[in-house]
Amino acid sequence: MRFRSAALGLAVVATAAVGLTAPAEAGPSTTTASTASTAAAATKVVSSAIRWGQNGDIPVARNYVGDSRYELAVFRPSNGTWYLRGGSTIKFGQAGDIPVPADFTGDGRAELAVFRPSNGYWYVRNVGQFVWGQRGDVPAPANYVGDSRAEAAVFRPSTGRWFIRGAAQIAWGVNGDVVAPADYVGDSHADLAVFRPSTGRWFIRGASQLPWGVRGDVPAPANFVGNGKADLTVFRPSTGAWHVRGGSTTTWGRSGDRPQPGNYAGTTATDHTVFRPTNGTWYLRYVVQTTPPTPPPTTPNCDPSYPTACIKPPPPDLDCGDIPYRNFRVIGADPHRFDSDNDGIGCES
């Protein structure tokens, strides 16, 4: 989707220093983590529970450092302060502001930014301030033009119109829709999209209407399948399940959690992540590659049912506790019955 430049009729003022107050000294607390292996030999699922925030905080994880992965972060409306895990604590904003971090400069890093509904101003740290919107608008910054940086944009529910700074006004949606812009086509820029909770349908500009979800679902589009574009995804609070169109369903979370998909592990995949406001904890689930042990050379003493591990054929009959191998491939007869659930993996841990 491309846009032609047009006057939007929203007032714009000269860029200037934002002038919000200096960093404060306070932050969320400690972290815990745990790891669990899957049945696959070359990958494992890692899960972490990290306390970073408190009730009332707004999760704003983004790539602030420029290392292609998300940093945990929260914005605290009560004091207008941002808390970036592994980074600074920065006072930038005030009560009533809506955090809208994004890469507005195209340098590969997200800038701290807020939209102030009371005056329609956007404040972008170290960049400036400008008017773009009005009270009641829903801010939705994204790279709509394809220039590697985010444009300020608002969706106006009262009229169903999008106002994209530097582009055209576009009618797309109705009152009650949830904005869900993302790169659904894989052409390196965001497409206008809304999720309609009343019908569970997605409306993506330039594509068909697609039913995916039910009333109460929360849209959470991201590239889960690994095809270079965002997949239609909903998080269902009633069950804690993520439903990915064209992918698998993963249960991760519970009612009240806020889905925050992103690349937290630094891999090429999107990680299932939720922020739990009740305890200020982030719950991350991601798949990482592992390096399996080098298979030993095949010898007459290695049973062919276990091609990646050298295990002698019976007798004697061996159990998993008798051998040092875990999560190895099983084919053929499996004389030791290591693959009890017949999924092709022996001695799963």
Image (spheres, rainbow, N blue to C red):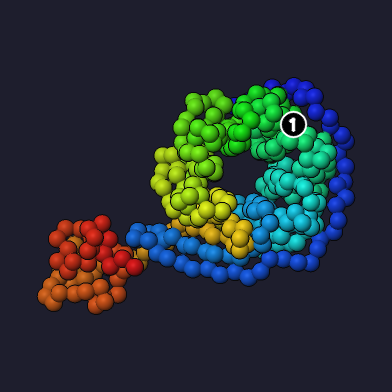
Which one is nearer the viewer's eye here, 214 or 99?
Answer: 214
Which one is nearer the viewer's eye here, 26 or 291?
Answer: 26
Residue 253 spot, x, y in % from top left: 50, 55
- The amino acid sitting under disc 1 is Arg
Residue at horizontal 28%, vertical 67%?
347
Circle 1 is placed at which residue position? 165
Q: Give the left or right position of residue 130, taking residue 320 as reference.
A: right
Residue at horizontal 49%, vertical 62%?
47
Residue 181 spot, x, y in % from top left: 60, 36
Residue at horizontal 66%, vertical 60%?
55
Residue at horizontal 68%, vertical 49%?
109
Which one is nearer the viewer's eye here, 127 or 12?
Answer: 12
Label 1 secondary element: loop
Residue 66 spot, x, y in % from top left: 66, 52
Quadrant of residue 334 in the image?
bottom left
Res. 195 visible in picture: yes
Placement of 55 over or under 246, stated as above or below: below
Work out which residue is located at the far left of the displayed protein and give it.
Answer: 315
Q: Quadrant of the C terminus?
A: bottom left
Instruction: Categorize mark 1 by other alpha carbons within 10 Å: few (<14), some (14-19), many (20+).
Output: many
